[in-house]
Amino acid sequence: MSCIYSCSSTPSFFAPFVSSRSSRFALSSSNSRPRIHCALGGTVAEPKITTAAEPLLLNAVRGEDVERPPVWLMRQAGRYMKSYQIICEKYPSFRERSENVDLVVEISLQPWKVFKPDGVILFSDILTPLSGMNIPFDIVKGKGPVIFNPLGTAADVEQVREFVPEDSVPYVGEALTILRKEVDNKAAVLGFVGAPFTLASYVVEGGSSKHFTKIKRLAFSQPKVLHALLQKFATSMAKYIQFQADSGAQAVQIFDSWATELSPVDFEEFSLPYLKQIVDTVKQTHPHLPLILYASGSGGLLERLALTGVDVISLDWTVDMAEGRRRLGPNIAVQGNVDPGVLFGSKDFITNRINDTVRKAGRGKHILNLGHGIVVGTPEENVAHFFEVAKGLRY
């Protein structure tokens, strides 16, 4: 049976689908609703009826029948935009920009006003909760995160307070509430948090790291100390997600950026249990809140990431989308995973990569995104082209 997708004069990715037997995707014929078979043999769960009142992104995550994949880009609000650069000139401190309600709202809405993505993510940082946990830090231009007093002992960990977002970051809640009203369900408002191991890596290493020797020394020589720190972060980040959801976030992404520095066996000890704890805790109070998990370079951990119980796995660009679909199975949504470097290519090249990614992802349960954040220096007109092509797709 041939694919039954239709296309219009808008950009389309369906040309490779039209032949009935040579197509990389085909609809199976049975008495049940169609299921899409992906390039490497996996399947996507059958679509459900769309709820029109909900944003496209939420409908897609829940497996409802949508007309196209929703699209947003990690770091879509940031330094590649001229309007953001103007704000940076006036407010050079990143913490000022990310901790002032008016600035957070303005920056978060910049890409929404220009590109109209299907997701509007809060402008913030995964380290924002640290001050409220008694961990002083700053984000220095040209250097990145700086932890003033890196943690390394049981006594250090004892001084870490559990996070109370209502008291420590009320501006986050206020900004999300405003964003929800401004976007008015025309897109999903997204919040985000850092995962316990990634946060622990920053506060133990003292900032970014190449080899992660300090956090691994702690893990392998004093595991009880690290577990105590990870537990505080897990409890705190669960509260932070709940706070964001109560304030207006309609989905929340968890960034475990450094989890892939761990071997699989160490991931199972120092990351997976805490991610699962966060998901379980949040689902008790917010069972319908979509949770997205992103870990850069996660090709070796995909099946383990799915064990966390999140609703969406965000793939980085080093994983073939069709293979990722097959490995994760039909019941979990995927996000991604165009190489951010593609946005430095020609418009035809960008279009082809979008088409390839969406074709491999199959119909439904897919959020089109990059496999990492937008790179500084990316041409703004190429970002505009990405959104134009993506929003012109039709299943």
Image: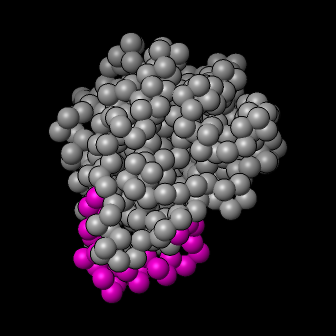
The answer to whether residue 74 of the structure is visible from this angle is yes
Numbered disc total: 0
Which x, y percent locates residue 214?
A: 47, 79
- The residue shown at (70%, 50%) is 375
Residue 214 located within the stretch drawn in magenta: yes
- The residue shown at (73%, 59%) is 142
Which x, y percent locates residue 255?
A: 45, 52
Which x, y percent locates residue 78?
A: 68, 40
Which x, y percent locates residue 252?
A: 40, 39
Q: Is residue 207 above or below residue 356?
A: below
Residue 44 located within the stretch drawn in magenta: no
The secondary structure that most of the magenta stretch takes on is helix
Q: Is residue 304 left or right of residue 341?
A: left
Q: Residue furthest left?
A: 284
Q: Is residue 283 left or right of residue 322?
A: left
Residue 381, located in which quarter of the rendered image? top right
Residue 239, located in which quarter of the rendered image? top left
Magenta part of the chain: 206-232
Q: Nearer the viewer, residue 79 or 119?
A: 79
Q: Is residue 190 above or below residue 262?
A: above
Q: Nearer the viewer, residue 323 or 115?
A: 115
Quarter placement of the N terminus = top left
| Colouring scheme, one of rainbow, by chain, secondary structure, one colour | one colour
Q: Residue furthest bottom?
A: 221
The answer to whether residue 352 of the structure is visible from this angle is no
Q: Is residue 341 left or right of residue 394?
A: right
Q: Is residue 323 above or below residue 192?
A: below
Q: Is residue 363 left or right of residue 245?
A: right
Q: Nearer the viewer, residue 179 or 207?
A: 207
- The residue shown at (43%, 22%) is 177
- The residue shown at (70%, 19%) is 9
